[in-house]
Image: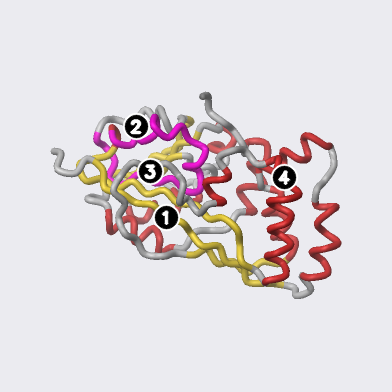
């Protein structure tokens, strides 16, 4: 299977419209790692996780299969962006203390990626993959978004999305998982910011490409009736899987 690029065409929107991960997550992962020399942030997108990991590691190598995403990567002196797939990173053997995959592992060729992660990880190196799925806003808006995402847009999600839908519980993960803390993404957004987020979805863009119409035309009258406040608090639960690779090696 070749690299599946679901986000290049909306890379600018992705950069400005996605929720940010909590700082506590990155401090926690850095504490788990056996060292602080190198982190490989795989499928980095615009570098949202890489830039948050930068204070904790001497070097970050941030890779993505999409050149358009990498071009928009947020810069820090200790982050090196490279165009590379998850399955063929180009990193040296046993070089990374921490390997992170932020809301992207569901798109991978899992057997090949996990073999690559084991090759790249240092002895006792940490692999951490996570995703967020549906947001919590209010019972009425949550029900509307459930209908919009999984009834109206059902046929336009790429297959990997269903791992996210299942909170990563069915994501292939052939390792002994570490019990982890619970983390959340919390944002205070107005309705326009929420609509920008929707426009970063692969399903939204697949629908537009197929029909040459905007699915927000269907959603907006229903959403406007429910979203009357200027700003609402939005919460996404993070679904985190961690393991320690190459235990006892070295």
The residue positioned 80% from the left and 56% from the top of the image is 219
- Determine which residue is flagged by label 3: 173
Q: Quadrant of the C terminus?
A: top left
Q: In the shown orientation, is residue 58 left or right of residue 86? A: left
Q: Nearer the viewer, residue 242 or 99?
A: 242
Of mark 1 and mark 2, the one earlier in the sequence is 2
Q: Secondary structure at mark 1?
A: strand
Total marks placed: 4
For label 1, the crowd category at 10 Å Cα-Cα, with few meaning under 14, some 14 to 19 and many 20 or more, is many
Whether 97 is among the magenta residues is yes
Q: What percent of the width, then of the height, locates residue 96?
A: 29, 41
Task: Tell me the magenta residue range.
Answer: 94-118
Name the secondary structure under disc 4: helix
Circle 4 is placed at which residue position? 204
- CB within 8 Å, label 2 to label 4: no
How far apart, in angstroms, are the residues tagged by discs 1 and 2?
20 Å
**Dot in front, 4 or 3:** 3
Q: Earlier in the sequence, mark 3 or mark 1?
A: 3
Instruction: Tell me the SS state at disc 3.
Output: loop
CB within 8 Å, label 4 to label 3? no
């Amino acid at each position: 299977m070749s690299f599946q690029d679901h986000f290049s065409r909306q890379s600018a929107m992705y950069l400005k419209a996605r929720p940010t991960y909590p700082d506590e997550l990155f401090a926690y992962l850095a504490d788990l790692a056996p060292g602080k020399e190198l982190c490989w942030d795989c499928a980095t997108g615009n570098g949202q996780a890489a830039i948050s990991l930068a204070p904790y590691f001497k070097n970050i190598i941030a890779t993505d299969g999409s050149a358009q995403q990498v071009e928009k990567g947020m810069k820090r002196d200790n982050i090196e962006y490279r165009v590379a797939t998850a399955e063929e990173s180009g990193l040296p053997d046993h070089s990374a203390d921490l390997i992170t995959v932020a809301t992207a592992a569901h798109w991978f060729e899992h057997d090949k990626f996990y073999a690559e992660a084991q090759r790249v990880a240092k002895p006792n190196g940490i692999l951490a993959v996570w995703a967020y799925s549906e947001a919590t806003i209010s019972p009425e808006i949550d029900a509307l978004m459930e209908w919009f995402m999984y009834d109206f847009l059902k046929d336009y999600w790429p297959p990997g999305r269903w791992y996210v839908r299942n909170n990563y519980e069915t994501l292939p993960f052939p390792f002994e998982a570490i019990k982890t803390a619970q983390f959340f993404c919390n944002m205070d957004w107005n309705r326009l910011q929420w609509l920008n987020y929707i426009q970063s979805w692969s399903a939204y863009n697949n629908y537009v490409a197929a029909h040459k119409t905007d699915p927000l035309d269907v959603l907006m009258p229903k959403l406007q009736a429910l979203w009357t406040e200027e700003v609402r608090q939005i919460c996404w639960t993070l679904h985190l899987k961690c393991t320690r690779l190459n235990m006892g090696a070295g």
